[in-house]
Image (tube, helix red, strand yellow):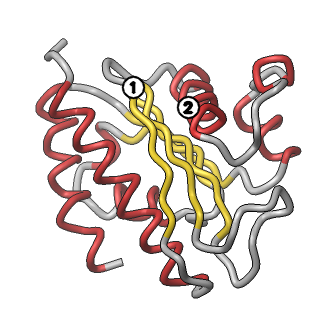
Amino acid sequence: MQNLLPIAEKIGASLKERRETITIAESSAGGLISAALLSVSGASVYYRGGAVVYTLDARRAFLDIPDSTLKGLKPLSEQYALALARGARDRFASSWGIGELGAAGPTGSRYGDPAGTSVIGVAGAVERSLTVRTGSADRIANMRAFSAAALDLLAQCIAAAPRS
């Protein structure tokens, strides 16, 4: 968690300065993205909410994304992660949303993706996505790597976005 704090502090300061908000929908990161953002003093100004959407039931309950929105999308794809990010953002009327899912390990996903694979989407004034492949089966190390990648991607998007 310590390695996530500097980027979370930078993001928190940017969101506060811009008067913008964030909602998180994470899966294989297990809540670490939210924990990092919530570790910053004054997080209640920008953090609208978050959920660990580890299952289809959780996604349906917390994000209320219609199944038709995800129909035809590979579950472990950047397009799916962006759909989660948009769903989280829209559900809480936030400026930004992060969607993350993957296979932390020690085994791969049921869709054939190896352990150490995560897809991340950021939705807001700028939208971007990425795939992370650590090549490792170390569950905890992967969760940290996925969280760091998500926070880095969010910071890039915020920096690239016009001020509202």
* Coordinates of residue 127 in the picture (x, y in percent): 39, 25
> In percent of the image, x 14 and y 17: which residue is there?
163
Quadrant where the image shows the C terminus: top left
Amino acid at pointer 1: Glu
Residue at the disc numbered 1 = 127
Element class at badge 2: helix
Answer with left or right where residue 10 lies relative to residue 111: left
Crowdedness of circle 1 by 10 Å Cα count: few (<14), some, many (20+)? Answer: many
Answer with left or right where residue 22 lies relative to residue 106: left
Element class at badge 1: loop
* Coordinates of residue 93 in the picture (x, y in percent): 49, 19
Residue placed most toward the observer, 148 or 90: 148
Q: Where 65 sits versus 132, above or below? A: above
> In percent of the image, x 66 and y 35: which residue is there?
80
- How far is the residue under mark 1 from the one under mark 2? 8 Å
> In percent of the image, x 80 and y 46: which residue is there?
58
Residue at the disc numbered 2 = 82
Q: Quadrant of residue 38?
A: bottom left
Q: Earlier in the sequence, mark 1 or mark 2?
A: 2
Quadrant where the image shows the N terminus: bottom left
Q: In the rendered structure, are the residues bearing label 1 and label 2 in contact, judged by CB atoms less than 8 Å apart? A: yes
Q: Quadrant of residue 128?
A: top left
Q: Where 137 sits versus 113, above or below? A: below
> In percent of the image, x 85 and y 45: which residue is there?
56
* Coordinates of residue 109 in the picture (x, y in percent): 78, 64
Crowdedness of circle 2 by 10 Å Cα count: few (<14), some, many (20+)? Answer: many
Answer with left or right where residue 44 lies relative to residue 159: right
